Amino acid sequence: MSELYSITKKIISGGKGILAADESTGTMTKRLDSVNVKSTAENRLLFRETLLSSQSMKDCIGGVILYDETIKQTASNKKTIPELIESSGTVPGIKVDTGAKILANSTKEKITEGLDGLRERLKEYYKLGARFTKWRAVYIISENFPSKLAIHTNAHALARYAALVQETGMVPIIEPEVLMDGTHNAEDCLMKTSEVLKKCYDELILNKVDLKGTILKPNMILPGSTSGEKIESKKIAELTLKCLKESVPSDVPGIAFLSGGQTEKEAAENLNEINKLNNTNFVMTYSYGRALQQSALKFWSNNIKDINGTQNTFNHRAKMCSLAAQGKWTAEIENK
Ligand code: 13P
């Protein structure tokens, strides 16, 4: 177990966070389509290799979550992608769920799949160099959602996943994402996220998962994206801290937020406020996909040969997130 604790520490300490580069081929194709780049295996690798070779990998990124395709690819310097990541002192990770499908007896809600054959797949990923993993459950908010059924079944799957991952010697990231889509207000998000998190920890404890060797990847507490409600960053931080303090056992060493559709700036500013107010024992950091990669992807798509320019754009984002993880981000530094 002490091995798990040191992996966890390496990923999230010292102002470092996680780069979530684990978009499935379908999602990555959408991202590349949006900037008019053809989604081939070569182009997906080229963009990812450019980020994974940048300076901020050493300074700001403690772990990278990969997708099945990428963990098996080789970089242009002949290193495997996990070797390239390790050469920056960063921990390679892997998404191991196989996606969210419609839950039986529900019209809209989803259950995340991937438990069948998971033990064997985990062993293979360990051999390829992965030392941590991710499983994402997804919940929607509306008057009747998330339902007890979605909350219960997803918590059960997350806990069985986490137990298998620890058995293989890797750190599980537990990601119950309550989506920001909807007209709900921030108080609703707080109430529903708390219910989801509490059930996850009931199941994790029942499945004897060692919480000290896990990382939680939650959403921040935000008003629904079509609610018309705008609240200050400080209020978001207060509500998020209240939710996590009440719902997450203190044994959990670290919380690495997803960005979930926030802009790059919002994701940095909100994390910064959370760290300024943080009165818990949890390390509060980032595990961002879009909020770390969006600008770099846009720059790259217009300047596909400009490796330095793409890396500089990514380095700036990673630096902003790292400052936010230490409560040291400011709007002035952001705009420099
Ligand atoms: P976003 O930060 O783009 O929400 O992605 C994080 C993630 O890994 C979602 O599973």
Image: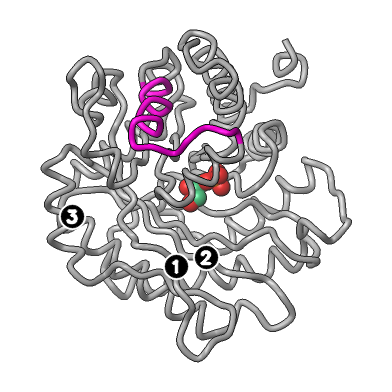
Residue placed under numbered mark 1 in the picture: 100
Is residue 274 left or right of 225 when viewed as pictured?
left
Give the label on residue 138, or none: 2
Q: What span is colored magenta in the figure?
A: 35-52
Badge 1 element: strand
For the residue carrying disc 1, how many other residues have a C-alpha within 10 Å: few (<14), some (14-19), or many (20+)?
some
| Residue 276 is at least partly visible in this image | no
The image position of residue 304, as x and y in percent, is 50, 18
Q: Amino acid at mark 1?
A: Ala
Q: Amino acid at mark 3?
A: Leu
Quadrant that contains the C terminus: top right
Answer whether residue 41 is magenta in the image.
yes
Give the CA distance from mark 1 to mark 3.
19 Å
Q: Residue at position x 57%, y 69% from top?
A: 139
| Residue 180 is at least partly visible in this image | yes
How many marks overall?
Answer: 3
Main SS of the magenta part reads helix
Earlier in the chain: of badge 1 and badge 3, it is: 1
Determine which quarter of the picture holds residue 302: top right
For the residue carrying disc 2, how many other residues have a C-alpha within 10 Å: few (<14), some (14-19), or many (20+)?
many
In the rendered image, the vertical position of residue 173 relative to residue 118, given as above or below: above
Is residue 8 left or right of 329 when viewed as pictured?
left
Residue placed under numbered mark 3 in the picture: 122
Observer-side mark, 1 or 3, equals 1
CB atoms of marks 1 and 2 within 8 Å = yes
Is residue 209 left or right of 291 when viewed as pictured?
left
Badge 2 element: strand
Which is more toward the observer, 324 or 139? 139
In the rendered image, the vertical position of residue 238 relative to residue 270, given as above or below: below
